[in-house]
Image (cartoon, rainbow, N blue to C red):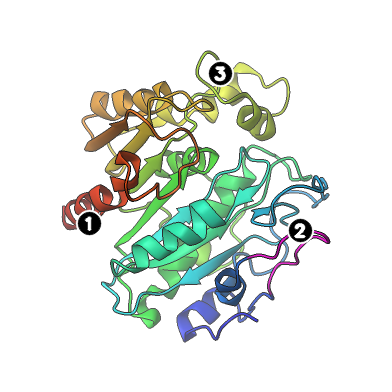
Amino acid sequence: MAGVLPPGLASAATGDVRPPLQTPIGASPLPARWQAAEAVRLWPGAAPGGTFHPAGRAADLAATFLTDVAVPELRVFRPRQANGRSLLVVPGGAYTFVSVRNEGLDVADAFTALGYTVFVLVYRLPGEGWTPRADVPLADAQRAMRVIREAAGSAGLDPAQVGVIGFSAGGHLAASLLTGFGEALFPAQDAIDRLDARPACGALLYPVIAMEPPYTHALSCARLLGDHPDAALVARRSPARHVTAQTPPVLVAHAFDDPAVPWQNSTLFIEAMQAAGRPVEAHFFEEGGHGFGIGPANAPAGQWPRLASSWLDRAFSG
């Protein structure tokens, strides 16, 4: 059962503490620490954007790959000694599922150890009936930032020091938040929607950035935009095209041997940041493949949390 929320989080969630997500029959259970984590519902009522239609899931899909997200939420992980800063963590999954272990729970473990309060986002998947499909994940990410900020004061956190970390398709969503935090996607649901959704900074791990060949991840693109998106929609959801002077500082990390999302996705965003005169740091690893999460501690790709920690100190202090 979910833990007890502090007053600020209970207020942000309109007092709704969600029960653990159900594990599909025959699948290994979700990790106990995930099940026990505080859960905060994002929206005060039904989430805006059409009607949920479960897409179903393959029988052999890991339990930690969440699908059928009818009610998006945050899972909250707290450090023993908080530094007052928060991170919104956005797992990937090709916009087909949400990978909450290696790109959620593991990341929470790494950064709570550094003093961060971590909020892992379980966002709606665009192929599960929502309309417009290309807007609902970003709407959830915007709302998540606002919920965290609304709760910050009563939870002993600084509402100005909230960053975002995204992985793979979650990296696309994080990049979309960093560049599209001000997009008006749905009518305001309550006072929380009047808060600023701009992250203070962001880290993108092997992110999907391109929404067209030759560098896009075809499945992520198709799930988000549909099978035959027009040029305007492709451009609208290509975050490198929307970097401006208001885009927060960004760190990017990618492996050169990534077989799924070419490393050029990261360079597209880096070049856009440089062209806009925005702070950007990049780390490219010879090996690591795709989906390495926090990475093995004894390999170069596993050093990115340490590198990110130093960078976050500078970004939050800047």
Image position, residue 132 (x, y; %)? 70, 39
Q: Amino acid at mark 1?
A: Phe
Q: Which residue is mark 1?
A: 316
- Asked which secondary structure carries label 3, the reply is loop
Seen from the viewer's position, the closer of residues 54 and 254 is 254
Kindly check if marks 2 and 3 are in contact, taking CB atoms under 8 A apart as contact: no
- Asked which secondary structure carries label 1, the reply is helix
Residue bounds of the magenta highlight? 20-30
Q: Nearer the viewer, mark 2 or mark 3?
A: 2
Image position, residue 51 (x, y; %)? 80, 51
Which numbered marker is on residue 231? none
Alpha carbons under labels 3 and 1: distance apart = 33 Å
Q: Amino acid at mark 3?
A: Glu
State whether the magenta stretch is mostly helix, strand or loop: loop
Q: Residue furthest front?
A: 298
Other-residue count near label 2 (Cα within 10 Å), few / some / many at <14 / 14–19 / ≥20: few
Q: Which residue is mark 2?
A: 27
